[in-house]
Image (cartoon, coloured by chain):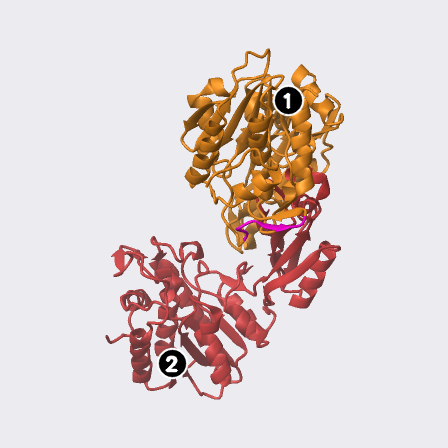
Chain colours: A orange, B red
Amino acid sequence: MTLDLHADPVDLTCALVDIPSVSGSEAAIADAVQAALEGLGHLEVVRNGDAVLARTNLGRASRVVLAGHLDTVPVNENLPVRRDGEVLHGLGTVDMKGGDAVFLHLAATVTEPRHDLTFVFYDCEEVEAVRNGLGRIQRELPEWLAGELAIVGEPSNAVIEAGCQGTMRVELRLAGRRAHTARAWMGENAIHALVEPLRRLAGYRPRDVEIDGLTYREGLQAVRVSGGVAGNVVPDEAVLAVNFRFAPDRSPEQAEAHLREVFDGFDLSVVDVSAGALPGLTAPAAAELVRAAGGKAAAKLGWTDVARFAALGMPAVNFGPGDPTLAHTRQEHVWAGEIRQVAGVLRDFLSGR
Amino acid sequence: MTLDLHADPVDLTCALVDIPSVSGSEAAIADAVQAALEGLGHLEVVRNGDAVLARTNLGRASRVVLAGHLDTVPVNENLPVRRDGEVLHGLGTVDMKGGDAVFLHLAATVTEPRHDLTFVFYDCEEVEAVRNGLGRIQRELPEWLAGELAIVGEPSNAVIEAGCQGTMRVELRLAGRRAHTARAWMGENAIHALVEPLRRLAGYRPRDVEIDGLTYREGLQAVRVSGGVAGNVVPDEAVLAVNFRFAPDRSPEQAEAHLREVFDGFDLSVVDVSAGALPGLTAPAAAELVRAAGGKAAAKLGWTDVARFAALGMPAVNFGPGDPTLAHTRQEHVWAGEIRQVAGVLRDFLSGR
């Protein structure tokens, strides 16, 4: 399979979709991407597992990293690609071979960029974090991720999404004392004890936080509740799992301290946490990108690999074609116009028009 | 195996314990009980499945039914019987071969009772209600359960326990609307909605109801709570299961109406219900029995087959040797003194001394 990186990025998206690349089986697509990038002649290209890295070394004052994962979730009767006028249907059209196609096209066609460029096409984003190719590169080739701005091409409806919320999951454990329900006064009902933490949750007023002109809405939600021994037993334990989505002006430590205050008096343990990412849109390269996009940017709500770059201290944004709510669905499809729009904004930004 | 019904009921208890009779395998013990009762000569004896029925036909003005199940829960390293002075250890010593032994001994030795007597030794009490031998007899030989008083020999610490609480299980179903927790304002959290029913539960003040001098304590307890879709999803459903133990002055319909009032505004469905049983201690035969026991009686807390007789409109009590909290434990054991005490009270009552 030979990829023509100079072709219309819409056609290139179709070509990439038609190389199946479910997580763990990215060798074929990585081979094709590597061969195409090496064929350009002006880039330093490195292979790392089934990730392909390429960069310019033009001595520019700043460097922009463009990163996209090559893998997809499992096939769901949605291959090969089906083009219906201006709509491309198929696995990966949204998540995220449209973004990959844009980056590959720019690698071929923007040969005199204003910033040095690093392209990162990586494996295993759709599976457990421990297998994530970007994490492996960070451990093995950290210098390849350095720069003044990172652009992750995950679908964002062709809108620049900056930073992201952090997320923390905690468990509250309520204790009681077992008894037969016919002698309930000998026990202490742990499920009844949920009333107070649930009251605090239901009455919680989340913050809306403005950072660099973007609004991050926090949220505190019960995501699981469980308790009960048998139909005739006063239960001695109940567990309430809560998910806190916090604005990136809080560190994980501050987020935990806040939850300990909200649930003061209860047995709380942190199950997992991912730090948020500040948008960093005041950094020069980021500000230029926003200008190239017509001044529009939004706060990212979910958590993406953008946060990995943010953790390295880099401004990092999400910018790619496709509606993220269609990702991982059988009906995955993207408008060709969004692919061209993202390509156009990035071309303007990188070439300094 | 030949049973000597004239022997000390403590020795008879040991003999019965040493005939294994896990539910569904009662043929051997039923054979032995049938042969022994037929050997007495003064009783009409009938076999029904692995139940054995026997009765006097003396033309007395009233009839007392004495019922005990022959089966046990599965063996748990607690056979054969082990006698340690005045304590008998082993499966069934408490639940309820001590009671069976007392009834068999009385069948043999009280040949001139004040009331006609019916003895019911039945199978499959320890398993699903649909297999219960007493239920089968009620369907196939209902005249054998008729009488002015029923005494069920389940362990009751040798205290007369009268009537029993009813029990009803209901489920409350809370509905919401799913959303990603990063966009929680688009959803509606069904777990948060538990706060109001839990508040009502935690604040519920159960009644203490006095009937025939006995106090029935009601109770309303959550026994299970569940809800949750995934760690990042606002849940759209939560379920709260509640067990209501109600005094026998309420019918099941009244109990349900009460719960619908307590949980007004919520989606409530009844999962199962067993009616309670009024103590009926003002009935003449029941009052005589209480007098024979020294005037002491207590309210039964759990639900037993006593309620089957109560449903037939008969006063019915629980009266047997053994601590019910030891039933179904490997450490099951009974004091010989309790077996003799129950035998003595019933002998006085039945022979009219």
The residues bearing labels 2 and 1 have C-alpha atoms spaced at a distance of 90 Å
| Three-letter amino acid code at the position of disc 2 | Gly
Find the magenta span and give its range: A78-85
Q: Residue at x 48, y 45 (%)?
A: A20
Percent position of residue A162, x then y:
66, 27
Determine the chain carrying the residue at label 1. A
Residue in the foreground of this view, choosing between B136 and B70: B136
| Three-letter amino acid code at the position of disc 1 | Leu
Determine the chain carrying the residue at label 2. B
Q: Which mark is residue B302?
A: none
Q: Which residue is mark 1?
A: A350
How many numbered marks are there? 2
Q: Residue at x 48, y 26 (%)?
A: A53
Q: Dot 2: within a 10 Å radius of its alpha carbon, few (fewer than 14), some, or many (20 or more) residues?
A: some
Label 2 or label 1, whichever lies nearer to me, is 1
State whether residue B223 is above or below residue A308: below
Secondary element type, mark 2: loop
Q: Which residue is mark 2?
A: B49
Residue A247 visible in the displayed image: no
Residue in the foreground of this view, choosing between B273 and B311: B273
